[in-house]
Image: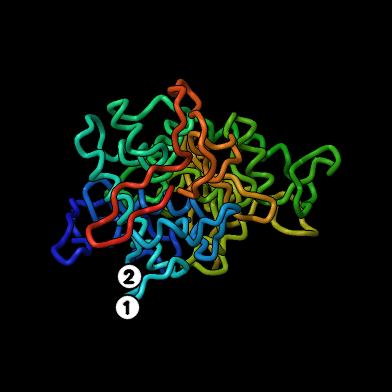
Amino acid sequence: MGTYAASGTPQQSANRSSLSPGTVPAAYQDPIQKWGSLCPEISPPMLAAQLYQESGFDPKARSGVGAQGMAQFMPGTWPAYATDGSGDGRADVWDPLDAIASAATYDCAIAKEVAKVPGDPQANLLAAYNAGEGAVKQYKGIPPYKETQGYVRNIQAMARSFTAPASPTAPLEVSAQSSAAIYFAQTKLGTPYLWGGEGLPSQNGRFDCSGLTQAAFASVGITLPRVANDQWYAGPHPSRDQLRPGDLVFWATDLGDPRSIHHVGIYVGGGYMINAPHTGAVIRYDKIDTREYIGATRVTSDGAQALPTRNDDGTVNAPSRPGGTGATAPAGNQGGSQGVPQGGAPATPVRSAVAAPPAPAGQAPAGAGR
């Protein structure tokens, strides 16, 4: 397990979970792997899942309440946990390498605060990140807040999408819903493509690529995000020789950056997929072995449920926090109003987002939230 080094930088260990190739932008792969080993309670896939939930790996992300950067730190909290991950002698909230290092530093500070709480240390850390370490101590584990329980479940589920298989030949469970999703797509063969199409009556039942895959899995009770590069995170990633019918298959303009994913189809076997290819074409079978193929996803119900939604401008709508204003409350340690947590919480005001742990020695005290 990773431990703190004397220098304050993480030590690598062979038994840490590794990131699955292609799940984070290539420029962030090594830093997330490195800083995700900062303390035993976190892992590279867990840190990647948090960063994706907060900003979709967007280093320029800014929330409506002022949270900044890839890790969505509030300005008042940043100085306490700011870490120079880029090695340029300064810590900048807008520098993604600094944000990655600082997010891990913050996670490990929270973990230290709740280290004596019984139960799963990582789950307690995530619960404290969401609801504050005081709530975790009070309830001796994950508090009975709907938002917090959902946050812990979703981050741990999403982390599985970022986790590399134990070996290249490690089997992945086959989705029970895959055959029905394929059947739905087969009923749409020959339907003309429509950019933005979701199969609505007003669209004459036409689809674009991700609209088709979204509808196919909706037919079996699984809700996928609307865009292809978010659907990429709806489950683990089988290798080419592990593909099974029903897996989603993806194409990107930059094979080192999943943010560039632009096309998705449903694998049917034999090197073929069903997809809605482009304007002027119809839903059809196509080969998958082409130049921009980046990989595949085996959709799972919990993986799909864990994914964040996006606002109209394409920014990630991060999860709500206890004491926030509901599903659209600012998150990611973005501060906000105080209020009463939902889901059986005590009738005393608590901070929305997370109550910041004590700052490391010699640094300024943290503000509300991250």
SS for callout 1: loop
**In the visual, does 112 lie left or right of 182?**
left
Q: Which residue shows up at 38% across the image and 43% down it?
A: 355
Is residue 167 visible in the rendered structure shown here? no
- Residue 118: image tag: none
Q: Say if 158 sits above or below 26 in the image.
A: above
Q: Which residue shows up at 33% across the image and 55% down it?
A: 365
Residue 98 sits in quarter: bottom left
Q: Nearer the viewer, residue 221 or 71?
A: 71
Is residue 154 visible in the rendered structure shown here? yes
Q: Residues within 10 Å of mark 1 (few under 14, many from 20)?
A: few
- Image location of residue 346, percent across then percent down: 43, 22
Q: Which residue shows up at 51% across the image and 37% down it?
A: 338
Q: Nearer the viewer, residue 204 or 109?
A: 109
Q: Quickly name the residue at label 2.
A: 84
Q: Residues within 10 Å of mark 2 (few under 14, many from 20)?
A: some
- Image location of residue 335, percent across then percent down: 49, 47
Question: Hey, what amino acid is under mark 1?
Answer: Gly
Pointer 1 and pointer 2: residues touching (CB < 8 Å)?
yes
- Image location of residue 4, percent across then percent down: 18, 57
Q: Quickly name the residue at label 1.
A: 89
Q: Nearer the viewer, residue 315 or 188?
A: 315
Which residue occupies the extreme top position in the image?
A: 344
**In the visual, does 168 lie left or right of 203?**
left
Q: Earlier in the sequence, mark 1 or mark 2?
A: 2
How far apart marks 1 and 2 lie (CA) works out to 7 Å
SS for callout 2: loop
**In the visual, does 102 lie left or right of 72?**
left
**In the visual, does 126 lie left or right of 300?**
left
- Image location of residue 214, percent across then percent down: 64, 42
